[in-house]
């Protein structure tokens, strides 16, 4: 028998009490939500070495809000994104940070990859010195170790509790949240900074890889390039970004009178074990159903499903097949996609896409999927919200899908409390 969230004592129930983010179309929870409700895309023209002109989702946050310029130069883009998001999340939570025991703060950051940017840059730099490795930066190793983004957050904010990154491909944002919740339940920390970050647009390799695969989106209008579910979609828009949450036990949040965005009611992760890149809808169905079971919910209890759909033909179709299997009989479940606004933020995707939907608990609105001029018949599922926001009224539960390469799947369910 699996105990559902409501059956657990408050000391085992995990809630979101703060949100910090940067997205290609907004640098705060409020600004980001406004962009999603107003149809504002964050995709623009972008140029990177060896690729030339392409399209990307680029963040423009105030990096020096929590870091000195010297530290930004010494560190990484992923670390900088993470520091900004963590600082904003702590500020938003209203926690007394100065008097918080930093040994009981845990940092759990999902990433798709890390170190590619720095390695490419170093190789490019020593090319100008006939590949003389004596010109290789002594900052390279701390920049490229896998725990770097989480470690940079700890260095900057003075956190001395546990920290690590979770490599979970494009499922990593959800995985960060899941890890944070588990560590809180185990008593390994009293406050978790959890979510995901992405520096992907800084590496030409990711663009080249998707281009070689025939999966890199193109469009004369950048704002229309990311178009999941549309018949004319032609691939992924690579984006950077980050979203980090403060997670606490419900008992602690109540004690300090914290505002609560929602409760982590259920979650699940599994693996396709079928292909390097092609998704398996059967495993996606299993992952969604397991999250629902752990939350003690039925499909009809979910008001919004936030899709992973990236704008690739088969990927979109397979996820729609899975959603149709789980939610096909629910007339009260509505479905949207955030990548149509910001592109694919890789390791940050799941966390960012969830934060775009969380405000629905307050305003009762489901933001749309934009850029759908002609719906792919294979993606025509009931409840899909297209091009214009939809008023739902009382939104009580959101299911957030996030899937990744090598068949990793993650699902998180957040409920109103």
Image: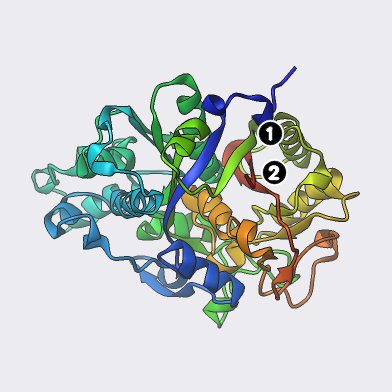
Q: Depth check: give the residue in front, 219 or 132.
A: 219
Q: Depth check: give the residue in front, 323 or 180.
A: 180
Residue plotted at (29% across, 39% down): 148
Disc 2 and disc 1 in contact, CB within 8 angstroms: yes
Where is residue 160 shown, x and y percent of the image?
Answer: 24, 30
Where is residue 114 shown, x and y percent of the image?
Answer: 36, 44
Q: Is residue 408 visible?
A: no
Q: Depth check: give the residue in front, 179 or 253.
A: 253
Say whether disc 2 or disc 1 marks the residue closer to the N-terminus.
Answer: 1
Asked whether, in this view, residue 115 is left or right of residue 327, the answer is left
Above or below residue 328? Residue 63 is below
Asked whether, in this view, residue 30 is left or right of residue 413, the answer is left
Q: Secondary structure at mark 1?
A: loop
Residue plotted at (36% across, 65% down): 50
Q: Is residue 31 visible?
A: yes
Q: Residue furthest left?
A: 134
Label 2 CA crowd tier, 10 Å (few <14, some 14–19, many 20+): many
Above or below residue 410? Residue 242 is below
| Circle 2 residue | 279
* Label 2, label 1: how far apart the Cα atoms are: 7 Å
Q: Secondary structure at mark 2?
A: loop
Q: Quadrant of residue 96?
A: top left
| Circle 1 residue | 272
**Location of the N terminus (image quadrant):** top right
Asked whether, in this view, residue 11 is left or right of residue 1, the answer is left
Where is residue 193 shown, x and y percent of the image?
Answer: 39, 40
How many labels, in total? 2
């Amino acid at each position: 028998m699996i105990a559902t969230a409501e059956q657990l004592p408050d000391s085992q129930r995990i809630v979101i009490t703060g949100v910090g983010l940067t997205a290609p179309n907004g640098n705060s929870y409020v600004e980001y939500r406004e962009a999603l409700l107003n149809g504002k895309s964050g995709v623009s023209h972008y140029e990177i070495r060896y690729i030339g002109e392409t399209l990307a989702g680029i963040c423009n946050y105030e990096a020096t809000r929590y870091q000195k310029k010297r530290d930004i130069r010494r560190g990484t883009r992923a670390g900088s994104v993470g520091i900004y998001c963590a600082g904003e999340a702590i500020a938003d939570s209203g926690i007394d940070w100065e008097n918080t025991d930093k040994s009981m703060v845990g940092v759990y950051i999902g990433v798709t990859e890390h170190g590619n940017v720095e390695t490419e840059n170093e190789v490019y730099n020593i090319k100008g010195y006939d590949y003389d490795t004596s010109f290789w930066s002594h900052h390279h190793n701390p920049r490229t170790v896998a725990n770097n983004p989480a470690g940079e957050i700890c260095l900057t904010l003075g956190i001395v509790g546990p920290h690590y990154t979770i490599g979970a491909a494009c499922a990593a944002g959800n995985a960060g949240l899941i890890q944070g919740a588990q560590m809180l339940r185990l008593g390994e920390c009293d406050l978790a900074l959890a979510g995901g970050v992405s520096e992907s647009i800084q590496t030409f390799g990711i663009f080249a890889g998707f281009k070689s695969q025939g999966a890199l989106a193109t469009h004369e209008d950048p704002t229309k390039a990311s178009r999941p579910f549309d018949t004319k979609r032609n691939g992924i828009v690579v984006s950077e970004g980050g979203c980090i949450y403060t997670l606490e036990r419900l008992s602690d949040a109540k004690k300090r009178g914290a505002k609560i965005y929602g409760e982590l009611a259920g979650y699940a992760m599994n693996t396709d074990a079928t292909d390097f890149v092609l998704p398996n809808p059967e495993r996606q169905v299993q992952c969604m159903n397991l999250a629902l079971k752990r939350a003690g919910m039925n499909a009809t209890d979910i008001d919004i499903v936030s899709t992973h759909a990236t704008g690739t033909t088969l990927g979109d179709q397979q996820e729609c097949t899975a959603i149709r299997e789980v939610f096909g009989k629910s007339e009260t479940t509505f479905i949207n996609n955030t990548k149509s606004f910001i592109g694919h933020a890789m390791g940050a995707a799941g966390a960012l896409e969830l934060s775009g939907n969380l405000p629905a608990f307050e305003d009762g609105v489901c933001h749309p999927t934009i850029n759908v001029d002609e719906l792919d018949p294979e993606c025509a599922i009931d409840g899909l919200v297209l091009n214009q926001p939809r008023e739902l009224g009382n939104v009580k539960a959101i299911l957030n899908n996030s899937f990744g390469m090598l068949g990793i799947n993650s699902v998180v369910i957040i409920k109103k409390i």
